[in-house]
Amino acid sequence: MPFRDVRADFPILTREAREGGRLTYLDSAATSHQPADVLRAQEEFVRLHYGAVGRGAHLLAEEATEAFEAARSAVAGFVGAGEGEIVWTGNATAAINLVASGMGAASQGIGGSESRGFALGAGDEIVVTESEHHANIIPWQVLARRTGAALRWIPVDDVGHLVLDGLDSIVNERTKVMAFQHASNVTGLIHPVGRLVDRARAVGALTVLDACQSVPHLPVDFAALGVDFAGFSGHKMLGPTGIGALYGRRGLLDALPPSVYGGSTIKTVTMTETTWLGAPARFEAGSQPVVQAIGLAAAARYLSALGMTQVAAHDERLANRLRTGVSSIEGVRLLGPIGGGSDPVLGLAAFTVEGVHPHDVGQVLDDAGIAVRVGHHCAQPLHARLGAQSSTRASAQVYTSDDDIDRLLEALSGVRRYFAPKGAS
Amino acid sequence: MSGLEQMYQQVIIDHARERHGFGLDSPAGARIGESHQVNPVCGDEIRLRVALDGERIAGVTWEGHGCSISQASVSVLHDLIEGTTLDEASELSSAFRALMDLRGDPPDPEIDDMLGDGSAFVGVGRYPARIKCALLGWMALKDALIQAQKETR
């Protein structure tokens, strides 16, 4: 272990599984659990400091505003963002949508001349990859439809790697924006962000990174990665649901038009015209998820205390145990490579079991106290490319141990037998 | 019996493998109705076709892919529904839906009798996430019967 056994920090992990016994939680790529520190931070804030943020002249309003902005600074520091570069959003999905919708608004002239750089039209191109989560495909499909721009994508090979041979033709001088994931929620593959960013920069395209799988497990510094925008979610990194963030380079965020409109975002409003504040205020219309922001900052502090380098080492070790183990079970196909070393992967494994539907796999595992995700994991194009209709996915977090992985592997070994015809071995 | 054993009774595992009524068929002279249903969570889908001969359901055939619960459920549906009248089919559908609401408790002997192999699905009621798997084919049946009744001949 690169750090102490932290299982005891997570209250929910002490509860029993469906048929009694230890709960083996391997669904952290869907949503992770919160340590007591994170729960306590939210409770303390609600008990002692809660009030309306950004308005009001009383003590609680003042303390709540201070805590809310301190949370923003803590989260910014965690991902290498500076002052004014973190916008609160509901989650990574909302962050990506904020950028795509903002570009759509700019294409209709909203935001005036300073937003013109975000406008698209016929002849322009948007690039995604075939490996994306639906949340990083659909907003761009819709933006293409709205603006007349064309949607192109970087294909993946039979294993799940991005095929970069044709990168220079796919990302070209017509490309206005390129959106891609840092790591796949299906194959676990960590993509070569630097190479993609270099190409985008060479042609003057904006980059939007879906970082919701990477930020919980790797040291991530958006400024160092060189991306223009990035989104991530609190609930995958030991924080609460309902909170996430959009990172944007400051000069860009101040020029991107908002696409959700309301209070606290404006400089002036007349009956015919509105002028907006700079970032982040222009994007945070209406009351914000203040308690959740406090919780997310506490999660960032908790992970920082463990050390993200150590967290990544833990994840890498579990990835190897999990993926090697899964791929060595007869009749089980791991989606993606075993990976490791120069072919880095996250601590997750999506797999298919010959002759057994993922729902049935998940049910048998649940009976053994093991929680996994089943379905297409919101990545239907990638599943189709890899020749699977859906899959079962096990995923790790800091509280995942070797023992959890071994329990999964043991239960998984018995799944095919469970559904085999009676009398067969 | 654990919840898992109650859900995956041998009769269900057998039906999931045998898939009675698999392969779409359109007998001549019957009123045909068809329905395509998808479970958006997992991408499972079914295409179910009924052939109506007057008030009698002469044929129930289907194609699709899905988990053992959804596949077995349509297989049992085929056995139960083929040859019944519209009224009987409606009664069987209601009984099957009611079975899902029992949360694993045994059904009344009358319902148990009526559903035959279908009663084996009682264990599914303990797993709310799986009820829609068991109902996928039944939803397709309801829709297909409506379509068939719109046909004039």
Image (cartoon, rainbow, N blue to C red):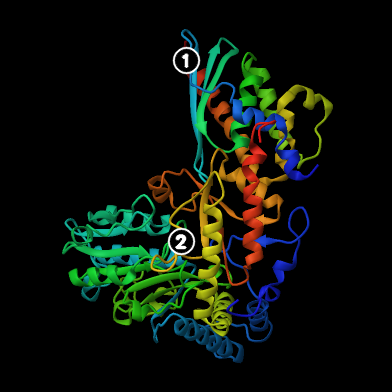
User: Residue flagged by tag 1: what amino acid is it?
Assistant: Ser
Figure check: B151 above or below A12:
above
Figure check: A385 above or below B153:
below
Residue lying at the far top in this picture: please name it: B29
Q: Secondary structure at mark 2?
A: loop
Q: Residue at x 40, y 47 (%)?
A: A386
Q: Does residue B81 appear to the left or right of A14 in the view shown?
A: left
Task: Tell me the residue that label 2 is attached to.
Answer: A188
Q: Which mark is residue A114?
A: none
Q: Nearer the viewer, residue B109 or A263?
A: B109
Numbered-mark total:
2
Distance from the alpha carbon under mark 1 to that under mark 2: 46 Å
User: Residue flagged by tag 2: what amino acid is it?
Assistant: Gly
Q: Which mark is residue B26?
A: 1
Residue lying at the far right in this picture: please name it: B109
Q: Nearer the viewer, residue A71 or A327?
A: A327
